[in-house]
Amino acid sequence: ALEHQMADAISAGQVARERMHKAAGLVDKVNEQIKLIEHSPHFRRRDPTGENGDSSSTSKFVAKHAAKVEEKKRLTAIVKEASSENFGLEMKRKRIQSQLEEKLKQLKEQSTIASAARRHADRSAQHAEDLAEHAEEEREAANLRHLARQKAQSTVERSEEDRSGMETQLRVAQEAADDAEKCAQQARLRAEQLTKEAAEATDHSKYHKLVERRKRANVDAVRLYEASVAKKKEEDGKMAKAKRLFDTSSEVLSRAEREAAAELHRANAEQQAEQNAINSYKHGMQLRQRADEANKRAVQLVALAVDKESAARQALDYKRKMAMIQPIDYDLAVVTALHSSKWKYWEKSLTLPSFQMHSISENTVLQIEHSRDDSKMQWTEYNKLHLSRTFPNLKTRISKGTSNYNPMVPWALGTQIVAMNFSSCDENLLLCDGRFRENGSCGYVLKPPHLTETFTRGVDLADKPERWSFQVLGGYNIPKPNDWVDRRISFTGGGGGSSINPFVRITLFPGVPISSARRVYQTRRVPSNGLNPVWGDDEGHTFDVDSPKLAIVIFSVWDKSDSGDEDFIAASPVPVSCMREGYRTVPLF
């Protein structure tokens, strides 16, 4: 809503300014008309008392003057009204702009909060992944503990079964020991009885036999008793070992049960934490989406705010410049033929009257040169009915380390005035010198018809391409370069000769609005001969010239040392339109 209000305020302000400027223009025209009327002889001859006599022309001029004064008052009131309306709209625009800046600040804060939420969501997602990995490891450990618990349970069950069997065997052994004890007791009683009977009897032989049998039976019973006691001790040891194993298994089982319960609680807690992390991640993703939307909105609002700020700055600049405008004297305005206007876009420039001209800097020329739209064609059309001038940029020249820009680009687009820097000589200044050789270096050269005529019925105005072949044969009396130093070294280690090693370089500028369109051909080097070098260029080189009426060829001679260093000697630029076929000499400068 604020953007629409801002746009409405700007459009309304623009309409008010246009109305104010239109009314101001009409006021200026009315002022000029009033001045013309006041300077006219008929108006000056009017009667100061108001009586015009029989002069009808004087009365007409007085009535016209009064009407123009009334029209001036009416237009002045319109200007004041439009100015007040423009001021109100400007205040409204500033208020809306402050609201937009506040909204932008809130969006930045929301973007900061969203960024923090996004970072929190990323950390939550990382934590959730770590918890998932930990939960997976704990599940595997729980499975292992469950297997250990099952094995311990089976071991306890086997131990319980062994214990039951041992207790049964021990009970049987105890019963056998009790039976053996009873038998031994009975045997002792019987032996005592038999001993008494033997003491009473006279014939002891049969009693001796019976005693021996009883003794053997007693020995066997004692042996059986001892074996039963030993077996009982063995079974008691086994039972104690089984009891210890049972106690250990019971302890392992209880510990496994506690660990299983703790692991189940931990698994439930991890599952809950994982669910919380998933919820946090979803919430973070929602916040991140909202943050991205807020960022996009903030970028749009920032761009809109920048545009509005630029528009406001331009409006203030325009207002400041309008306040600086002083009324021009009528006599000076009458003799002024050209007026400078700032270039904004060619669609508007093409609608300007012919006395309006543009001053375009080198950087703008480069932008138009590399643009892919119709800027070059529109500039060419503009130059057919208007004047334009270009000038070098000091900062650009310092950064590139050269003194001048390529003048072929504005010339190819029809520019009438191309300013150059004459403080130092370079290739581009040679092009400027070659351009005006076409008319005896008088400083004025006509443009070709395709850059001046808008339409001619039945006539092809396009510049037809040509093909030129060059063969460099020889030269004479070629001087040494300025500040020349002999850098060549002789085979003996001493200084070499004092002659130069000249070669010729031919550079074609084909006359198209592209700086990189130039083509270069270079001959071989003639060693140590500056008096009458002969290159004998039998093969030569052929150039295709796109626009012969604008193209320029630079013939330059250079000195090339044995180490590869090149020094400029002299050159001569020649327009292609001035060249003729045959054997030609080119004086160098």
Image: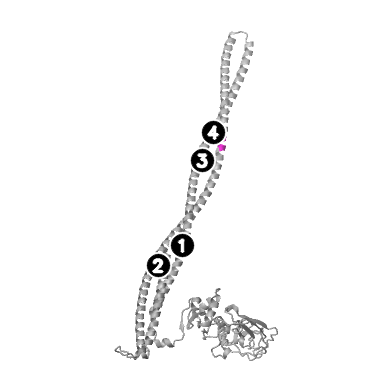
Report the mark closest to the observer, 3 or 4.
Answer: 3
> In the rendered structure, which amino acid carries the disc numbered 2?
Gln
Screen quadrant of the N terminus: bottom left
| Numbered disc 3: secondary structure | helix
- Magenta region, residue range: 150-155
Which mark sits nearer the N-terminus, 2 or 3? 2
Residue 438 is a magenta residue: no
- Depth check: give the residue in front, 195 or 131: 131
Q: Is residue 214 left or right of residue 34?
A: right
Screen quadrant of the C terminus: bottom right
Q: Residues within 10 Å of mark 2 (few under 14, many from 20)?
A: many
Which mark sits nearer the N-terminus, 3 or 1? 3
Q: Is residue 287 left or right of residue 519?
A: left
Residue positioned most to the right: 538
Which mark sits nearer the N-terminus, 4 or 2? 2
Q: Is residue 142 left or right of residue 559?
A: left
Cα separation between marks 4 and 2:
87 Å
Circle number at residue 297: 1
Which mark sits nearer the N-terminus, 1 or 2? 2
Cα separation between marks 3 and 1:
54 Å
> In the rendered structure, which amino acid carries the disc numbered 1?
Arg
* 463 lies above or below 201: below
Marks 2 and 3 in Cβ contact (< 8 Å) = no
Residue placed under numbered mark 3 in the picture: 260
Residue placed under numbered mark 4 in the picture: 246
> In the rendered structure, which amino acid carries the disc numbered 4?
Phe
Report the mark closest to the observer, 3 or 1.
Answer: 1
Which mark sits nearer the N-terminus, 3 or 4? 4
